[in-house]
Amino acid sequence: MSKEPRMTAHTQSVLRSLLGRGTDVENHASVLSNGVYGLALTRQTGLPNGTLFPILERLVQCGWVERYWEQDDAAEADGRPRRRYYRITTKGAELAPQALAATAAQADKDHRSGSSLPWPGLTGDAR
């Protein structure tokens, strides 16, 4: 298991989806217990596969997310291939909200101090 993942905007989006944020109460519980399959995560986050799946792999490697295949009979009943699901782990459920909150707080602090401006010395009043 590696260290905490880098909290890029894309990583934050994936974590919010895996935590069931932005879903109704019923779906929230389902996401936490059953996870979300890859294509659904692509749709929820708007991230292309080439961005999404490396993020998921990093989250798996640090122990925040687990992946598993759905049961054959569920896929066969729907007449489709099996789906690979991703679910937040106990460790991820504990650490991800803290990391998201810390990242948001830092972004807010940077915004208030002006340090998030793209060029040094640029003020919000560019003419």
Image: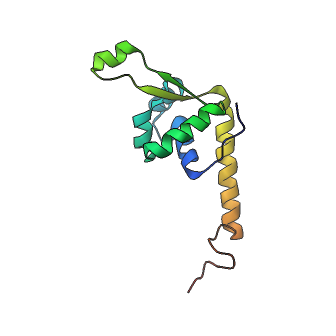
Q: Can residue 95 be seen from the camera position used here?
A: yes
Query: Residue 103's spot in the image, x, y percent?
Result: 67, 51
Quadrant showing the C terminus? bottom right
Residue at 42% x, 15% y: name it: 71
Q: As drawn, which residue projects farthest toward the bottom?
A: 127
At horizontal 45% and vertical 47% (from top left) the residue drawn is 47
Position above or below: 114 against 88: below
Instruction: Please give the name of the residue rendered at 57% of the width and 45% of the height, measured from the top-left corner.
Output: 11
Viewer-proximal residue among 21 and 81: 81
Question: What colouring does the structure picture have?
Answer: rainbow
Placement of 25 over or under 7, stated as above or below: above
Would you identify the image quadrant in which residue 73 lies? Answer: top left
Q: Position of residue 105 (x, y in %)?
A: 69, 54
Relative image position of residue 66 (x, y in whole percent): 57, 27
Q: Position of residue 2 (x, y in %)?
A: 71, 35
Q: Which quadrant would residue 78 be assigned to in this image?
A: top left
Q: Nearer the viewer, residue 83 or 126?
A: 83
Residue at 46 percent of width and 38 percent of height: 23
Q: Residue furthest left?
A: 79
| Image: 94 above or below 11 | above
Whether residue 64 is visible here, answered yes or no, is: no
Name the quarter where the N terminus is drawn: top right
What is the count of numbered marks?
Answer: 0
